[in-house]
Image (spheres, helix red, strand yellow):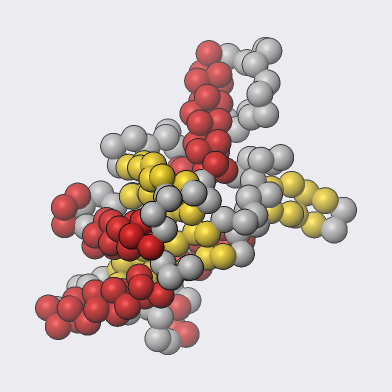
């Protein structure tokens, strides 16, 4: 079994999502001892933001492409191949300005490749990255899960549900720590709840 561990928080040792992803990976490997872990830090090793050079055909074409296109396509190929090879993907996704970090979005843009992670059919789009387990470690300063008004402002978990579903992921699990900006008691409660979630999402 291969597990891909991804962090995207810019806050280093102060990061809640990095703490959660490490706890998830530790719990998973303790219960699934045959797991091989590969790590990707999207802050220290982020792909460039999406450009026209990166948007060219990415299915092995080399003829007629510029040096920039070849370089960008090589990055995309490495990232999508790494993703497709993983049985389990653990993603640290902090909440920045109502959405996810740009580093994480840049990674997702490289995965969204026709013929690799999705295809269009006569009956609509079909995800091609089926059969994986994806665990999202979601962290945020406010509380966005308990009311429709706050849920409408949240484009972090909601976006990840849509894009992973588009890729064909049906086993999508969340570990959430929210209210982290609301004081020590709220932080302690958030991490207690997250710890319980970790035991549940790593059980099988």
Q: Is residue 200 in sight in this rendering?
A: yes
Q: Residue drawn at (74%, 47%), measured in percent from left and top? A: 119
Image check: 164 left or right of 64? left
Q: Residue drawn at (42%, 50%), measured in percent from left and top? A: 35
Image check: 199 left or right of 160? left
Q: Residue drawn at (60%, 33%), measured in percent from left and top? A: 55
Quadrant of res 181: bottom left
Q: Is residue 172 above or below residue 82?
A: below
State the image coordinates of residue 131 (x, y, percent, origin top left): 62, 56
User: Which of the pair 66/135 is nearer the observer?
Assistant: 135
State the image coordinates of residue 56 (x, y, percent, origin top left): 63, 28
In the image, farthest residue toward the bottom:
147
Quadrant of res 143: bottom left
User: Which of the pair 162/37 is nearer the observer?
Assistant: 37
Q: How many marks?
A: 0
In the image, farthest residue toward the right:
122
Q: Is residue 19 above or below residue 57?
A: below
Q: Is residue 91 in sight in this rendering?
A: no
Image check: 105 left or right of 73? left
Q: Residue drawn at (43%, 70%), measured in percent from left and top? A: 203
State the image coordinates of residue 102 (x, y, percent, origin top left): 39, 48
User: Which of the pair 7/143 is nearer the observer?
Assistant: 7
State the image coordinates of residue 138 (x, y, percent, origin top left): 36, 65
Q: Is residue 67 above or below residue 160?
A: above
Image check: 116 left or right of 125? left
In the image, farthest residue toward the left:
184
């Amino acid at each position: 079994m291969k597990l891909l561990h991804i962090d995207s928080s810019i806050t280093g040792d102060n990061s809640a999502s990095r703490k959660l992803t490490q706890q998830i990976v530790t719990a998973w490997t303790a219960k699934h001892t045959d797991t091989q872990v590969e790590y990707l830090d999207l802050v220290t090793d982020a792909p460039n933001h999406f450009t026209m050079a990166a948007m060219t055909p990415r299915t092995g074409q080399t003829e007629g492409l510029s040096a920039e296109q070849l370089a960008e396509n090589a990055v995309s190929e490495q990232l999508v191949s790494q993703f497709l090879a993983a049985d389990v993907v653990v993603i640290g996704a902090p909440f920045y300005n109502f959405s996810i970090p740009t580093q994480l979005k840049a990674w997702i843009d490289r995965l969204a490749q026709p013929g690799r992670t999705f295809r269009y059919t006569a009956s609509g789009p079909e995800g091609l990255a089926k059969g994986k387990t994806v665990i999202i470690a979601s962290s945020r300063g406010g509380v966005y899960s308990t009311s429709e008004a706050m849920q409408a402002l949240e484009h972090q978990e909601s976006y990840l549900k849509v894009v992973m579903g588009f890729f064909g992921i049906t086993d999508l699990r969340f570990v959430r720590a929210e209210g982290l900006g609301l004081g020590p008691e709220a932080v302690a409660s958030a991490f207690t709840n997250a710890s319980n979630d970790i035991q549940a999402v790593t059980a099988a």
